[in-house]
Image (spheres, rainbow, N blue to C red):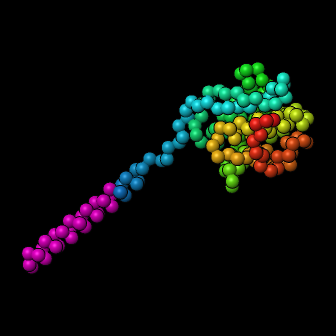
Amino acid sequence: MRKGNRVTLTVIGLLLLVVIGIYLIHRSSARHALPPAKPVPAQRIVTLYFYSPDTDTLKPEQRMVTTSMDTLDTCRTIVSELGRGSMTGLSRPIPPDVQVNSASWQDNGVLLLDLSDNLVRETPEGSSAEITAVYAIVDSIARNIPGVNAVRLTIGGKSPETLGTHIEIDQPIAPDYTK
């Protein structure tokens, strides 16, 4: 065999070994890859909306909370904080034990938010209480989650036409910071 052929075979052999080595390293590291990291909770300031009997409107209140940037976690934190009530003497807009069952994105910046059915059962009757509850949730969610243009509320996985008997919730609701 000529010297040139031996050099060519040696180079091809070395290249083949390099390719096999890279394949084995990649295959080994893929098997030992860590699962995707969960969002890390952090302290952040959120703006929540509570009812002011003096002005008959919702007023913003900022507070420091621990939440991740995950949409579901943020929604749960916001609804929980609304249920805890104001720290400045404003009225609590929703019952204290309302839970977020799920949160998912729809088209055009609409967030589908499924809440526990006690929101309906425990919200006082009357259009004012219903409007306050709905807009406190919608405004607080839209203010704190980038990209939310409207919130579509469902209750216990169902889509009722109204929260109680007054305010329609069967369509996405845009925030209204004047309520």
Tell me: residue 127, above or below residue 107: above
Point out the stretch of residues depicted in magenta. 1-25
Residue appearing at x 63%, y 39% in the figure? 73
**Residue 177 appearing in the image:** yes
Rendered location of residue 156, percent (x, y): 78, 45
Residue appearing at x 69%, y 41% in the figure? 142
Rendered location of residue 57, percent (x, y): 82, 30
Tell me: residue 60, above or below residue 141: above
Numbered label tally: 0
> Where is residue 97, by image quadrant?
top right
> Where is residue 167, by image quadrant?
top right
**Residue 95 appearing in the image:** no
Residue appearing at x 18%, y 68% in the figure? 11
- Front residue of 8 and 127: 127
Of the 4 image quadrants, the one containing the C terminus is: top right
| 2 is within the stretch colored magenta | yes
Tell me: residue 88, above or below residue 122: above
